[in-house]
Image (cartoon, rainbow, N blue to C red):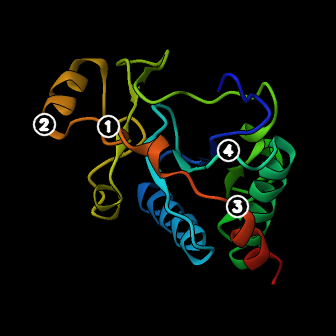
Amino acid sequence: RVPNLYYPDVCVFDLDPSKEDEPDELRAAALALRDLLKELGLVTWVKTSGSKGFHILVSLDGSARMGEVARFAHAVGALLVARQPERFTQEFSKVDRGGRILVDTGRNGYSATFAAAYTVRAKRGAPVSAPCTWAEVERGEVLPRTFTLRTMADRVASVGDLWSDLHGRGSSLRQPIERLKK
């Protein structure tokens, strides 16, 4: 964010399933990534993508340079793939994924984008990329397209902005990077 464009305030993981008809597998994948990041000492935030997957974010304190954040995210993705190669891949090409879930860490490079919270996606039914809780994910109450333009106002009225303090809880990557090296 301005004025520190080269010092990200979030680290983004985009889980992109090869198959959309396996919600239990996608949920288990999101929880596995959350648990790995927790092992590294990081608090995570989750939202629906409004498309096929989930976006998992780590709020950062802005002390790490963009390249360091990108390398960290890629290393976390690689560790997740190494731990569960039957479930995860970092192969971007769909033909090379073998039905596995892509751990897309490319959203952390300069000029890379991802759907912002509360973004309406250009898909049938106007799904919204919306913050949700880990408890909702655990219980299987939310899927990537659960929230829509028609339901979003009621959602925010009932739960508020679940990410209202996201930027106030930024973490340093210094210790997580050291833990990852071990």
Residue 124 in percent (x, y) is at 41, 18
Neighbourhood count class around disc 1 (C-alpha, 10 Å): few under 14, some 14–19, many 20 upward = some
Query: In the rendered image, which residue does mark 4 sit on?
Result: 62
Secondary structure state at the residue bearing disc 1: loop
| Label 1 with label 4: CB-CB less than 8 Å | no
Q: Identify the residue shown where x is 56% and y is 65%.
A: 42
Q: Identify the residue shown where x is 23% and y is 18%.
A: 150
Which disc number belongs to residue 158?
A: 2
Query: In the rendered image, which residue does mark 3 sit on?
Result: 173
**Which one is earlier in the sequence, the residue at label 2 or at label 4?**
4
- Disc 2 or disc 1, which is closer to the eye? 2
Which disc number belongs to residue 146?
A: 1
Which amino acid is tagged 3?
Answer: Leu
| Disc 1 from disc 4: Cα separation | 32 Å
**Which one is earlier in the sequence, the residue at label 1 or at label 4?**
4
| Label 4 with label 3: CB-CB less than 8 Å | no
**Which one is earlier in the sequence, the residue at label 2 or at label 3?**
2
